Amino acid sequence: MILNAKECKLQVQNMQFDYITFGSGTKPLVMIQGLNTRGIKGAALPLAYMYRIFAKDYKVYLFDRRPRAEDGITVRDMASDIAASMDTLNLKHADVIGVSQGGMIAQYLAVDRPDLVRKLVLAVTLSRNNDTVTKVVSDWINMAEQGDMRTLVADMAEKMYSDAYIKRYRLFLPLLTVLQKPKDVARFIVLAKACLTCSTYEDLDKIKCPVFVLGGGQDNIVSGIASTEIAEKLGCKIHMYDTLGHAAYEEAPDFNQLIYDFLID
């Protein structure tokens, strides 16, 4: 089976990271997910199936955030963790896909360790704070600190998905608030705060590898403008889903195909 999905653990210095690997190819592909409430443990098969288009050509790696995230950790620190994990596994010149907070991390990875990145995909992400992300993430942090997990998960879903998607699946939202309740609330708060530490805009010219940006015109978390300004600063290819929001990576049927075509070209 080309998916060959596995859950693994990796010792890096004094930390042990969970990671998922799948695919039967020889080329390395590192995928960096966005902020979520549950981590990647137990998600090997669903994630491998979701990104199965890459399984034939690539050996795919998805690294979780550090298990004990200390208050004050930044997305640049997370990029350092990814780099250390890649060094430990001897992954060089990998193609890298970063989504949302993962896109923030991926930018720092490409800036600080260009030897690790062959091609870079930045999806529904930003290079500097704006009013939209500051308010949304601050609200999520407040909800988590107050222990209002139901409102937190519901708000995350409503901010992420398009109106049409929410309308279609509204009956399932109560179930989502149960399934996506944070396992470790304190860790979620620390990782959410890290979303507000991205400041790569002035350093984007240090990224020398080919870059492809994808954004949602109706993005209610980082804003659609955040994607366009990255592409304009880099002078790179961009695809905007004008009618979709932050979850374009789930809603757009051609999302993975566009990325695949860019990486393989």
Image (tube, rainbow, N blue to C red):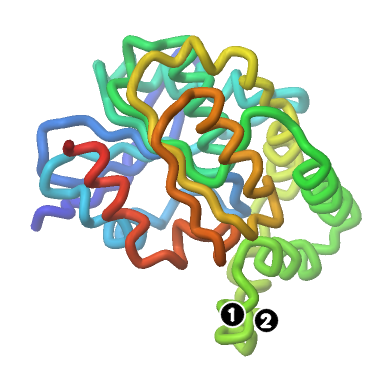
Q: Residue 202 appears in which quarter of the rendering? A: top right
Which residue appears at 32% of the width and 10% of the height?
115
Quadrant (top left, top right, bottom left, bottom right) of the C terminus? top left
Pinpoint residue 116: horizontal percent, then vertical percent: 33, 16
Residue drawn 27% across and 55% down?
A: 257
Mark 2 or 1 closer to N-term?
1
Quadrant of the frame with the N terminus = bottom left
Q: Residue at x 51, y 16 (%)?
A: 80
Q: CA distance from mark 2 to mark 1?
A: 17 Å
Extreme bottom residue here? 171
- Residue type indicated by callout 2: Pro
Image quarter of residue 228: top right
Callout 1 amino acid: Ala
State the residue at coordinates (40%, 57%).
43
The residue tagged 1 is 164
Does residue 91 sit above or below 257 in this rendering?
above
**Label at residue 85:** none
| Position above or below: 103 against 143 | above
Residue 245 figure quarter? bottom right
The x, y position of residue 149, in whole percent, is 78, 63
Q: Which mark is residue 174?
A: 2
Question: Is residue 9 visible to us here?
Answer: no
Identify which residue, 57 or 37, lies in the foreground. 57
Quick check: 125 above or below 55? above
The image position of residue 233, as x and y in percent, is 55, 24
Q: Is residue 42 left or right of residue 61?
A: right
**Lateral position of residue 82 relative to residue 244, left or right:** left
